């Protein structure tokens, strides 16, 4: 079985990032929109320089989280912080995902909101699985996250994991990885990986103490994923 990729999202501190250098994280996420963990391009550029201190071959890929960004916004950030991946959390269309992918020469991850409750939400909060079809061929990964009316992620709430197989069936049919986010912690991620085998897991608030990234929690999270 292939390993499960690990994405630590919402990094803001150079000191915390430096303390993670020996951890086998695959992706480090920086949030540019819709979050209390938001940073700007200049801050991201400083953090990217820390990633270059990782040992050759172990450097995590950098991911920028945006909500409905226009080209001007992306150009401004990418000029200061040349990201590897752009993760889109808004209502970006398949065409828009493809445009960003081609114009900026990056991978594009598309976040897909899933209800935090056990029943289907009404309206457009949770998008039907069938709507995914139009995105295949325009994105490089799909990320399932718990719907939150205020923040794009980091809500600390899980969604109904029983929904995962339906999404996995579609993504694997089209050969793209599925990441799972939303309320993950060192205490529950092992169960998720063992039962559902997603290609990646994404954590933010679950490795924080009082809103600040906690290296002991990050280490425990990584260890549990690797053990699973």
Image (spheres, rainbow, N blue to C red):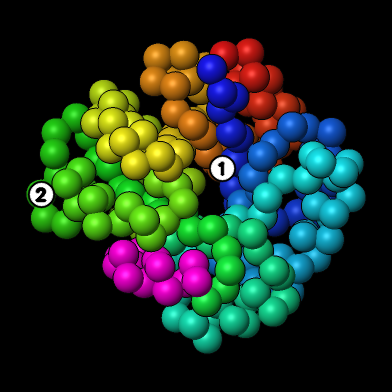
Q: Nearer the viewer, residue 103 or 73?
A: 103
Residue 97 in magenta stretch: yes
What span is in magenta?
90-102
Residue on which the image places disc 2: 122
State whether residue 187 appears in this view.
no
Query: For the point 84% across and 61% down, which residue is it?
Result: 49
Q: Main secondary structure of the magenta part?
A: helix
Residue on which the image places disc 1: 204
Where residue 41 appears, as percent x and y from the top left, is: 67, 73
Where residue 82 appears, as percent x and y from the top left, is: 69, 69
Q: Is tag 2's residue or tag 1's residue first in the polypeptide sequence? A: 2
State whether residue 139 appears in this view.
yes
Query: For the point 40% across and 46% down, which residue is it?
Result: 142
Query: What crowding class fits label 2: few (fewer than 14 Cα within 10 Å), some (14-19), or many (20 or more)?
Result: few
Quadrant including the C terminus: top right
Q: Nearer the viewer, residue 143 or 185?
A: 143
Asked if marks 2 and 1 touch (Cβ < 8 Å), the reply is: no
Badge number at residue 125: none
Measure the C-alpha gap from mark 2 to mark 1.
27 Å
Say whether residue 66 is left or right of residue 89.
right
Label 1: state its secondary structure. Answer: loop
Q: Quadrant of residue 192?
A: top left
Residue furthest to the left: 122
Say whether residue 150 is left or right of residue 18.
left
Q: Quadrant of residue 81?
A: bottom right
Q: Nearer the viewer, residue 186 or 140?
A: 140
Where residue 166 appears, as percent x and y from the top left, is: 24, 31
Label 2: state its secondary structure. Answer: loop
Q: Quadrant of residue 182?
A: top left
């Amino acid at each position: 079985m292939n390993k499960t990729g690990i994405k630590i999202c919402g990094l803001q501190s150079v000191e915390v990032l430096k303390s993670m250098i020996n951890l086998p994280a695959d992706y480090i996420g920086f949030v540019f929109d819709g979050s209390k963990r938001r940073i700007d391009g200049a801050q991201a550029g400083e953090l990217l320089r820390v990633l270059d201190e990782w040992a050759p071959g172990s450097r995590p890929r950098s991911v920028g989280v945006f909500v409905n960004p226009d080209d001007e916004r992306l150009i401004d950030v990418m000029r200061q912080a040349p990201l590897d991946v752009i993760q889109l959390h808004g209502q970006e269309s398949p065409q828009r995902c493809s445009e960003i992918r081609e114009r900026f020469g990056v991978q594009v991850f598309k976040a897909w909101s899933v209800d935090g409750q056990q029943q289907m939400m009404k309206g457009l909060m949770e998008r039907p699985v069938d709507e995914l079809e139009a995105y295949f061929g325009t994105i490089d990964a799909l990320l399932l996250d718990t719907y939150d009316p205020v923040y794009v992620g980091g809500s600390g709430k899980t969604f109904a994991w029983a929904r995962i197989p339906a999404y996995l069936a579609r993504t694997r049919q089209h050969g793209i990885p599925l990441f799972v986010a939303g309320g993950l912690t060192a205490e529950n991620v092992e169960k998720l990986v063992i039962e559902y085998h997603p290609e990646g897991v994404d954590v933010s608030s679950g490795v924080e103490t009082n809103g600040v990234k906690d290296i002991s929690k990050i280490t425990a999270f990584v260890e549990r994923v690797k053990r699973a």
